[in-house]
Amino acid sequence: MKRAIRTVELMHLLPQLRDPQSELHLLRSCMGIAKIFFGLRTCQPIHMKDAVILFDEGLCGVVEDIVVGGGPFFGDLQWRLAS
């Protein structure tokens, strides 16, 4: 859970760059996401439920900011295309 909290906190700092390409590159390569995914694959799902929910909400918010700049037109279709 601590790792998910730290990762989400880092993700929320990305919009300060004001460069969507750099934000996306850092999100994909430097946010510790690989470690979280490894933890999700190797731990019991019942123990990771809160961390998964927190991480998913944070990731969706950051991707929304990158794709539409925080605008109103981000739905399921845009999420599927972005992910």
Image: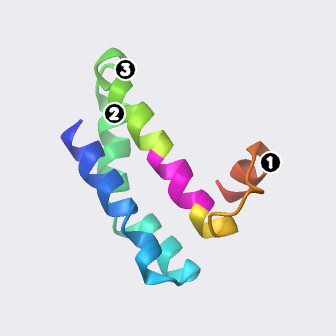
Above or below — where is 16 with respect to 30? below
In the rendered view of the protein, which quadrant contains the N terminus? top left
- The residue located at (69%, 63%) in the rendering is 71
- The residue located at (48%, 41%) in the rendering is 56
Mark earlier in primary sequence (2, 3): 3
User: What residue did someone put label 1 on?
Assistant: 77
> Which mark is drawn over residue 51?
2
* Crowd band around label 3 with a 10 angstrom C-alpha radius: few (<14), some (14–19), many (20+): few
* Crowd band around label 1 with a 10 angstrom C-alpha radius: few (<14), some (14–19), many (20+): few
Mark earlier in primary sequence (1, 3): 3
Circle 2 or circle 3, nearest the eye: 2
**Helix, strand or loop for disc 1:** helix
22 displayed left or right of 72? left
Q: Tell me the amino acid under the disc marked 2.
A: Ala
**51 or 72: which is nearer to us?**
72
User: How many numbered circles are shown?
Assistant: 3
Disc 1 to disc 2, how far (Cα)? 25 Å
Mark earlier in primary sequence (1, 2): 2
- The residue located at (38%, 43%) in the rendering is 37
Circle 1 or circle 3, nearest the eye: 1
Q: Which residues are magenta?
A: 58-64
Disc 1 to disc 3, how far (Cα)? 27 Å
Q: Per the image, is 59 magenta?
A: yes
Q: Per the image, is 79 magenta?
A: no
User: What residue did someone put label 3 on?
Assistant: 45
**Helix, strand or loop for disc 2:** helix
**80 or 72: which is nearer to us?**
72
**43 or 75: which is nearer to us?**
75
Q: Tell me the amino acid under the disc marked 1.
A: Leu
